[in-house]
Image: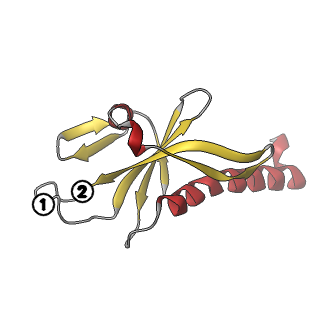
Amino acid sequence: MLAVACDHQVTTLAGKHPAKALARRLPSRAWNRLSAGVGAKGQRWYDWALIDIPVDVTDPKISSGHALLVRRSISTGELAFYRCYTPTPVPLATLVAVAGRRWTIEESFQAGKGLTGLDEH
């Protein structure tokens, strides 16, 4: 899983499009409310959607395992994007859990920097 910018180009059956343009076209039924894990203020709830990305656009029936995961803030509507690859299909909740680990990892890095004094440089 890799966080990408909103203008990250994604190749679909309809050509190349920025991630944010693909997210705008998603129907309301594509969004699922899931928690990205526990944060400092409790569960971190967002709306999530998954867009499958074919590797071979000439044969869309072949599952590639590549996808664009989209996170939408419930309060502001702000979007975040993640490129994903799974060799076998996994549930959306699993991808959300992986994306949610980023917060924990960044918190650990920050704490480690503080303990070693690296936050001073």
Dot 1 and dot 2 residues touching (CB under 8 Å): yes
Question: Residue, x 38% and y 73% (percent of image)?
Answer: 88
**Disc assigned to residue 54:** 2
Q: Amino acid at mark 1?
A: Asp
- In the image: residue 120, left or right of residue 35: right
Q: Which residue reaches farthest top? A: 76
Question: Residue, x 46% and y 64% (percent of image)?
Answer: 91
- Element type at marker 2? loop
**Colouring rule applied to residues:** secondary structure
Exactly how many numbered labels are in the figure? 2
C-alpha distance separating marks 1 and 2: 8 Å
Question: Residue, x 59% and y 59% (percent of image)?
Answer: 97
To which residue does mark 1 refer?
59
- Element type at marker 1? loop
- In the image: residue 59, left or right of residue 44: left
Of residues 108 and 56, the one drawn nearer to the viewer in this rendering = 56
Residue 9 % position (x, y) = 31, 40
Label 1 crowd bin: few (<14), some (14–19), many (20+), radius 10 Å: few
Splitting the image into 4 quarters, where does residue 115 fall? Answer: bottom right
Note whether 88 is above or below 102 in the view shown.
Answer: below
